[in-house]
Image (tube, coloured by chain):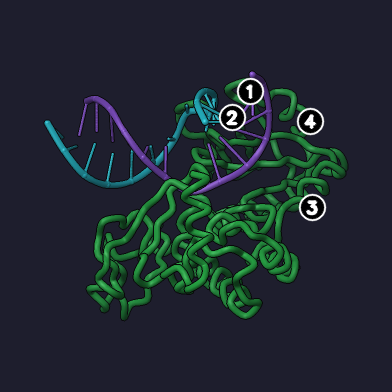
Chain colours: A green, B purple, C cyan
Amino acid sequence: MPEGNELHRHATQHAELFGSRIITVEAPNGRFEDGAALLNRRKLRSIEAYGKHLFYDFGPGRQLHIHLGLYGKFRTGELPFPEPRGALRLRFSSRKHWLELRGPTACEVLTGTEREKLVARIGPDPLREDAEVAAAIDRILASRAPIGGLLMDQSVISGIGNIYRAELLFRARLNPFRAGNSLSKRELLKLWRDARALLRAGMIDRRIVTTRPADRPHPSGNARRGETHYVYRRHRLPCFVCGGEISREEFIGRKLYWCPECQPAVEGSGSVRKQHLLSA
DNA sequence: GTGGGATGGGCAA
DNA sequence: TGCCCCTCCCACA
């Protein structure tokens, strides 16, 4: 489930296995042949994640950019290579380890300038130390668009996907259709801090867990299946907090989940909701 | 075993 | 707006 947390984890792991080493780069399915030739037998200097984007620095003019998208998957292991399986876009190897990449949205070699341009259009990433929170908060405070859309807009804030969008808004008890400019700086700062905490907590047992133990039907021990999220993919089920029914709606091409009881439209913001329904 | 849906985002039209 | 990527996981038979 690649949301920002997992991409940062990949960056760290790949740096351990392949950083500062000469890398053999291949394009088994032929869809990355030119790129592979540019990188092959060069030293991988560093790896960085910005939101959901990964950059592998093979030297000036040789910046490998990878975005997993919905289907992209990495696998790593120790040599020898595993049996070939499926469509393999990219294969890496050092003297000891291999890496496989399947189904990415982006796998391309950029120049330094192109990389900078791409990074410049990504909003601050709560997982990065150099993130400038103010840039995200200012964008949201200046926008009449619903906060539920702004949180998923990678140019506003990066690394948050559909699961964290739904869960962050629930934890903040914010209605997803409230306009960005109807929120306070304080509310947004709290949202940012919670995003950082949740993304850092990341995956437990290969699952994203956002529920607090006390809110779960079974509070002791690890979160059971079906108790890992408050609202994400829990439509028509009872809310863990109020018992009301969780809602789901298609919104900007993605499914949006929320609890109408716990995340009510604030008085006076009814027009925002109406506008949304009219434009849908 | 089978089939539908999903954690995204770029691009053509 | 719909298509592409073409994987993984789950529910259901």
- The residue at the point 64 percent across, 67 percent down is A181
- Mark toward the start of the polypeptide (4 vs 2): 4
Q: Which of A56 and A189 is in front in this view?
A: A189
Q: Can residue A171 be seen in this view?
A: yes
Examine the rendered structure and indicate whether residue A18 appears above or below residue A62.
below
Task: Tell me the crowding category of disc 3: few under 14, some 14 to 19, or many 20 or more residues within 10 angstroms, Cα based.
Answer: few
Residue occupied by mark 1? A31
Task: Tell me the crowding category of disc 2: few under 14, some 14 to 19, or many 20 or more residues within 10 angstroms, Cα based.
Answer: many
Secondary structure of the residue carrying tag 2 is: loop
- Mark toward the start of the polypeptide (1 vs 4): 1
Q: What residue type is labelled 3?
A: Ala
Where in the figure is residue A115, as x and y percent of width and height? 80, 45
Mark 3 or 2: in front is 3
Q: Which of A64 and A4 is in front in this view?
A: A4
Q: Which amino acid does label 4 sit on?
A: Leu
- The residue at the point 67 percent across, 26 percent down is A32
Examine the rendered structure and indicate whether residue A226 appears above or below residue A98.
below
CA distance separating discs 1 and 3: 27 Å
